[in-house]
Amino acid sequence: MFDKIFRLDYFQNQELLQVIILIFGILIFASTLFFVVGKIKPNANLGELKSRTRSWWVMAIVFLVATMFSNKISFIALGFLSFVAFRELYSILDFRNDDRYAVFWAYLAIPIQYYLAYIGWYGAYIIFIPVIMFLILPLRLVLRGETKGIIKSMASLHWIIMLSVFGISHLAYLLSLPELPGFDAGGRGLLLFLVFLTEINDVLQFIFGKLFGKHKIIPAISPNKTWEGFLGGIIFTTVIGYFLRFLIPLPVFEAVFVSFLIAFSGFSGDIVMSSIKRDIGVKDTSNAIPGHGGVLDRIDSLSYTAPVFFHMVYFLAY
């Protein structure tokens, strides 16, 4: 019974274990460093650094637990993540009362999308939301008979299901990819590689921006982002990806290129969500994580990096 719930082979894989130790080693070091600096220099402005570190602790624990359990439980956990992210986006966007029936259909699409990923039916998985739901949701809106504001509702509803469900569901599909000869890390290695690089890229861009940032990259969208932070994150995330390439079934050049794409697409996802929140006039999508905003605030980059990484690895290795 116990071995049907937990992946007992998880901690027997030395490659996965090394990355887990690395992740929590970095978190312990950062938390200790900020604590010591705060004691030595009480006036030091460490609030945002501490907040981001605490957020990273939450993310690391969530995804570690998700990968420790059996595939069924992992898929349910990741599906719930999409559900919460979808609800957060829906709650801050201005939908009409007549849209709630189509929204219900969109919620129903979440378990279907994750089931398709679970059984590894790639053909159905890849078209279900971009094609089938793209056609069904507008029809459901039209059947209500109210056309005022319908274009906005069509666009908004499909966009949030693409971002919060389709994008994030690629995390789950990584666990369904078939085994490859000589590649022991498997889907859980791919998931750890993706999540770690996405989060470390976010941290590195923030740190380099704070230390060296002088030139704003898109001040109208995200005033704190600088070219120095962007380039520092891109370069060092790519380098880290090179050293962690044993977690993915790709040769050196392709592993480096994929790491670069993760860094770039992570930045893209972050600024896209920043633009949405700025347009609406909110700082966070919700208060689901006290002191850290909503779930989507923590995984906005993953909604971009997950499909980019998945399809590159799928094309190159599978």
Image: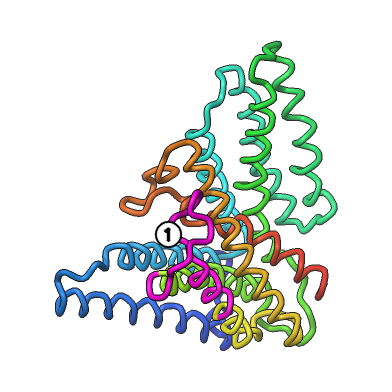
Q: How is the image coloured?
A: rainbow
- Nearer the observer, 142 or 71: 142
Seen as rendered, the residue at the extreme front is 215
Amino acid at circle 1: Asn
Residue at the image point whose x is 46% and y is 51% from the top: 295
**Can residue 224 be seen?**
yes
The picture places residue 3, in percent across and down from the top left corner, at: 56, 70
Left-right relation of 235 to 309: left
Check if residue 221 falls in the magenta segment. Answer: yes
Classed neighbour count for the residue bearing mark 1: other residues with Cα under 10 Å, few (<14), some (14–19), many (≥20): some
Q: Which residues are magenta?
A: 210-235
Residue 127 in the image: above or below residue 137: below
Check if residue 140 falls in the magenta segment. Answer: no
In the rendered view of the protein, which quadrant contains the C terminus? Answer: bottom right
The picture places residue 300, in percent across and down from the top left corner, at: 54, 54
Left-right relation of 235 to 291: right
Residue at the image point whose x is 80% and y is 32% from the top: 135
Residue 224 in the image: above or below residue 24: above
Residue 134 in the image: above or below residue 254: above
Name the residue that disc number 1 marks.
224
